[in-house]
């Protein structure tokens, strides 16, 4: 079983209809790859999700999200522009918890954690996490 931790970094000033649209993108990706709603955890760094009242677990710091998934036996995998392994060579843990956001190369990457990167050829040098997650879940499904 897979889990996903998503940094929700959209500004408080973002209009609720735009936030709802972005949330629906996340929901669609996770449901498409059968990630259970209780295993899709949002880190709401800016306290902006309150207007949506999502059914997913919402926490306010990455550490809080990790306290949920690690006791369930999930292995944290940071998906990051500076990840140690390239995605084509990456062996996905059986119970992976993919951590994405706020943007592909801008999240802090702990040096001692399992991490993976998507090979990019040319520009852009960064990806939005809405793009990263489907690529990683598709790779997992194909292997």
Image (cartoon, rainbow, N blue to C red):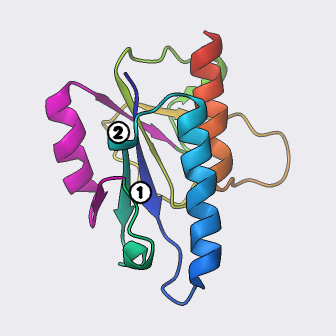
> Residue at image x 47%, y 18%?
92
**17 relative position to 100: left or right:** right
| Percent coordinates x, y for residue 90 in the rendering | 54, 18
In magenta, the rendered stretch is 56-79
Q: Marks 1 and 2, Cα distance to the nearest angstrom?
A: 22 Å
Q: Quadrant of the C terminus?
A: top right
Residue 3 lies in the magenta-colored region:
no
* In front of the other: 59 or 120: 59
In the rendered image, which residue does mark 2 sit on?
39
Neighbour class for label 1 at 10 Å: few (<14), some, many (≥20)?
few
| Percent coordinates x, y for residue 40 in the rendering | 40, 44
**3 relative position to 141: left or right:** left
* In front of the other: 21 or 108: 21
In the rendered image, which residue does mark 1 sit on?
108
**25 relative position to 124: left or right:** left
Mark positioned earlier in the residue sequence (1 or 2): 2
- Helix, strand or loop at label 2? It is helix
> Residue at image x 66%, y 56%?
128
Q: Do residues under tags 1 and 2 come within 8 Å of each other at their CB atoms?
A: no
């Amino acid at each position: 079983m897979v889990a996903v931790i998503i940094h929700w970094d959209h500004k408080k000033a973002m209009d609720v209809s735009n936030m709802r649209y972005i949330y629906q993108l996340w929901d669609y990706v996770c449901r498409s790859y059968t990630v259970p709603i209780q295993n899709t955890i949002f880190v709401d760094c800016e306290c902006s999700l309150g207007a949506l009242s999502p059914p997913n677990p919402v926490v306010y710091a990455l550490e809080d999200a990790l306290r949920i998934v690690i006791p369930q036996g999930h292995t944290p995998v940071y998906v990051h522009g500076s990840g140690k392994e390239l995605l084509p060579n990456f062996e996905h843990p059986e119970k992976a918890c993919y951590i994405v956001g706020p943007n592909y190369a801008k999240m802090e990457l702990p040096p001692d954690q399992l991490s993976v990167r998507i090979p990019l050829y040319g520009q852009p040098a960064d990806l939005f996490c809405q793009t990263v997650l489907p690529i990683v879940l598709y790779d997992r499904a194909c292997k």
